[in-house]
Structure formats: C-alpha cells, structure tokens
Image (spheres, grey):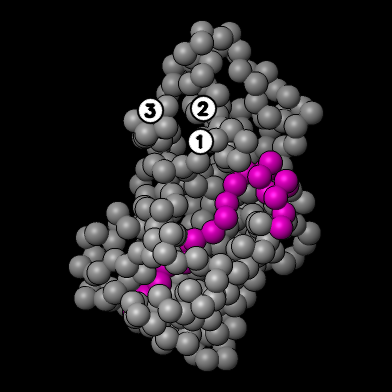
Amino acid sequence: MSNTPYSLAGKRVWVAGHRGMVGAALVRRLAVENCEVLTAPRDSVDLTRQDAVERWMAASKPHAVFVAAAVVGGIHANDSRPVEFLTNNLQIETNIIATAHATNVEKLLFLGSSCIYPRMATQPINEDELLSGPLEPTNQWYAVAKIAGVKMCQAYRREHGRDFISCMPTNLYGSGDNFDLVSSHVLPALIVKAHRAQVAGDKSMTLWGTGKPRRELLYVDDCADACVFLMKNYSGDGMINIGWGDDVTIAELATTVAEVVGFTGQFIYDTSKPDGTPRKLLDTTRINAMGWRPKIGLKAGVDMAYRWFLDNVR
C-alpha cells in the first residue's frame, strides 16, 4: 500500500454511471474538488460496447475514473434476470478497465458490492473473506461479475503497474434510489410499502421473509465521500470495505421506516419469500484506520430518502 496522495485538482474525472444513485452522489461530491467532471450520456455511449467506450475515452481523455456503472437490483431482480446481471456487468467493467489501461488513465476506482462475500462469511466481514466460501444463490450472478472486476483491477496493477483500486460498499440507499417494488432493494421497498399503507390507512403492511436477517446500511452520499477519500489517499492491491460497521434487523429497519413515514400499523411477515443472506456486516477497520468514517445516521438518512421519494417518485 502506498500513502502517496493523489490530487484531483485540475484533473478530468469520469464518473461512469453518473445517472445511477452512486454515480449521481459522486458527481455531487466532486463538485468541491476543483476538477472537471466528465459524464458519458447513455444515449450516446453504450458501455456494453467496447468500441463505443474506446472512442469516448480516446476523445475525452480522463485522468481518473470512478466505475459506478452497473446493472443493479434486489433479490427478485437478481434471481429472475441472471443473464443481464452477469453479462452486462462483465461487459461494462471489462470495457472501462481495459480502455483505462489502453488510454493511460492515471487512477481508477472500481465499486464492488458487499454481496461478493460468501453467504456464510465470518461476521463482521473483512476484506480477506473474499472467495473463502459459496456465494448467496439469489445474487450470485451479480457477485461473480463484481468479483471479476476486483480481480481485473488487481491484474492490471500486477502486470502493468496500473493504479487501479477497488472498494466494497455495504448496502446503499438515498437520493436517486430505485423505488420499484419488483426490482428495488429492501430499504426503498420498505419506504414504498409504508407510504402506501399510511396513505391508505391500512392497519398492517407485509414484509418479505422473517424479518430476522441483519443489514448494514449506508447513505449514498457517505459512500461517495468515501470513494473520493480512497481515490485521493489509497493505492493498494487489496480492496477496501466502506460502511458503518454496525447493522440492524429487517424488522428494526422496518420500524425506523414506519416512524419516519408515520405508519402506525402492524407488520405481517411473508415467510414464503426468501430472506437472502442472513447477515452482511462489513469490517471497516481498514478505512477507519486511514481516517474516514460516515456521518449520516440511519434515522436521518431514512428521513432524507423519504423526502426525496416524496419530491421525485410519488
């Protein structure tokens, strides 16, 4: 690991996936970094096409790249669209990382996901748990693609000396989230369900599974801040976890959402639906030791996410 800081000042910085939740947060965060933020509109650059990525990067000449572009979704989306989650994500990351090498990009940060860790990983999960056991079956396609991206960054670093790094965010939520009940993650789904139940005056709302799995949640702007921090302060072969180092049960999370939304009814647990991974708590010792910690607590973050939902989705 190198402690040599990387300055973003005066650099052209490409946020791949700027329309997504993480990418949009990165654009907001980079606004104070005295750099030129580059974005590649989806209608003009198809990131799954190598030739399109090569043409755009050759013309735009970014100095630094954040790879936040990905096909993402919750349990149902992952389980029902395995080809898309595996193939499209492999294409996107391969095209960007390979072209970053070919165009001499100075530094690249690849965003993985905590789902790349084994289903029954030791808790809290440190970075060395990668590939130590079987994956969670419901999101294995996405996980395999993300693991490939991590290994690709390590390979280019080892063979070509490229300063390509990877980070593993925990479960993210916030402004710009996906609030579609069929394809969303757990927190936005809970917000939609609680909102609809509250508006309808329902006495109950249904939750998937038993409510017992534990989840760690990080507001997306905290994640973006950590990514910029790592881009500026970290250079190493090993990936770095990003999270709180603390978690709650789905039932506890639903209670927090209900308090924010104003829903006062009961929860009904549909145990015919899958729970997913029992627990995913990240060990954040490495990034904490470097001097970074999140700032936005769960209750405040859920309130901000709900306000964004009311203003932009409802």
User: Could you say which disc has been placed on residue 310 in the image?
Assistant: 3
Where is residue 63? Give x, y as percent.
34, 79
Position of the C terminus, as image quadrant, is: top left
Q: Which residue is mark 1?
A: 179
Which residue is painted at 60% across and 40% down in the image? 183
Badge 3: few (under 14), some or many (20 or more) residues near its Cα, within 10 Å?
few
Residue contact at pointers 3 and 2, CB within 8 angstroms: no
Which residue is painted at 54% across and 47% down in the image? 171
Where is residue 309? Give x, y as percent.
41, 32
Where is residue 53? Give x, y as percent.
47, 74
Res 282 visible: no
Q: If you read the primary sequence from the N terminus, does the residue marked by circle 1 or circle 3 appear first?
A: 1
Q: Which residue is mark 2?
A: 192
Q: In the figure, 251 relative to 161: above or below?
A: above
Task: In this rendered view, identify the residue nearer to me: 29 or 182.
Answer: 182
Give, as a three-letter code, the residue at label 2: Val
Residue 70 highlighted magenta (yes or no): yes
Task: Tell me the element at label 3.
Answer: helix
Which image quadrant for residue 142?
A: bottom right
Q: If you read the primary sequence from the N terminus, does the residue marked by circle 3 or circle 2 appear first?
A: 2
Q: Which stretch appears magenta?
A: 63-83
Give, as a three-letter code, the residue at label 1: Phe
Badge 2: few (under 14), some or many (20 or more) residues near its Cα, within 10 Å?
many
Name the residue furthest front: 44
Q: In the figure, 187 relative to 241: above or below?
A: above
